[in-house]
Image (cartoon, rainbow, N blue to C red):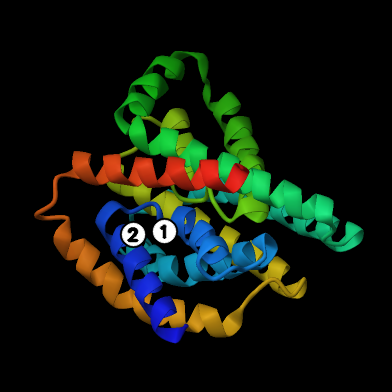
Amino acid sequence: MDWIAIASGFGIGAIVGLTGVGGGSLMTPLLISVFKLHPALAIGTDLWFAAVTKSGGAWAHHRHGHVDRRIAGLMLAGSIPASLATVALMHFTGVTQGWAGALTFSLGIALLLTAVVVAYKQAWHALGLKLERWLPERRKTVLTIASGVLLGVLVSLSSIGAGAVGATLILLLYPRLPAHRLVGTDIAHAVPLTLVAGIGHATLGHVDWSLLMWLLMGSLPGIWLGAQLTRTMPERAVRALLCVSLVAAGLKVIH
């Protein structure tokens, strides 16, 4: 089991290094299907996996000035309270069979949503430019906080959405944000959100700590290898394979 976990962490890490997305989206279905974890336990474990693996990237982007603190702050103003409220509701009601079904369904929807986001990456930028005339600064502020609320609930229920979906929402609202600041701001928002949601799930006993350690052990060299492969593998082919994997995993989880 330890070697399978290390190999799984390596594979997911390589995908993260290669595409920048897909780590959390593929890790949770993997934990459910291969390691036979309960959905709640898989989601909690994945939240910690995402928080740890993305923290180095967040620090690097912050150090290089690639983070728009205003946008990240507005999103966190919505996502952190939403995440805390979602976990508090789970504490209050208990993780019943109904909650397990809701978590599984949310996971499937999040996977399919991520697949759509990845497949139509360029289209979101064009749509954002078209919407810009209808979005004055005051409206953008409210919508940025609302986007954070949506992500806070989605991430807490499924562990998915802080990366690809979060980046797309930022792109729609701020289409003129340079690509490096878009990525940096998205990661800067994702790390605190996944950490808060992960702590919430940990208080419910939804983290397999030993499995998490083995996964992280494999992911670090995997991320490095994926980053090296970005120079040789065509982005369109990688994105197509990732979309197929996300759709297959989403449909399997829902059914």
Q: Is residue 89 above or below residue 182?
A: below
Instruction: Work out whether 88 lies above or below 251.
Output: below
Q: x, y percentage for residue 205?
A: 74, 75
Residue at mark 1: 23
Query: Looking at the picture, does residue 132 appear above or below residue 118?
Result: above
Task: Rate crowding at label 1 as few (under 14), some (14 to 19) or many (20 or more) other CA atoms within 10 Å.
Answer: many
Q: In the rendered structure, which disc, 1 or 2, sits on the residue that comes first in sequence?
A: 2
Q: Dot 2 corresponds to which residue?
A: 16
| Label 2 SS | helix
- 29 or 72, which is in the foreground? 29
For badge 1, the amino acid type reads Gly
- Quarter of the figure that contains the C terminus: top right
Residue type at mark 2 is Val
Q: Residues within 10 Å of mark 2 (few under 14, many from 20)?
A: many
Residue 176, picture quadrant: top left
* Label 1 close to label 2 by CB (< 8 Å): yes
Q: CA distance from mark 1 to mark 2?
A: 5 Å
The residue shown at (70%, 73%) is 202
Mark 1 residue element:
helix
The residue sitting at the right extreme is: 92
Q: Identify the residue at image location x=38%, y=27%.
A: 124
Identify the residue shown where x is 49% and y is 65%: 50
Q: How many marks?
A: 2
Tell me the quarter of the picture where residue 217 sits: bottom left
Residue 240 x/y as whole percent: 28, 39
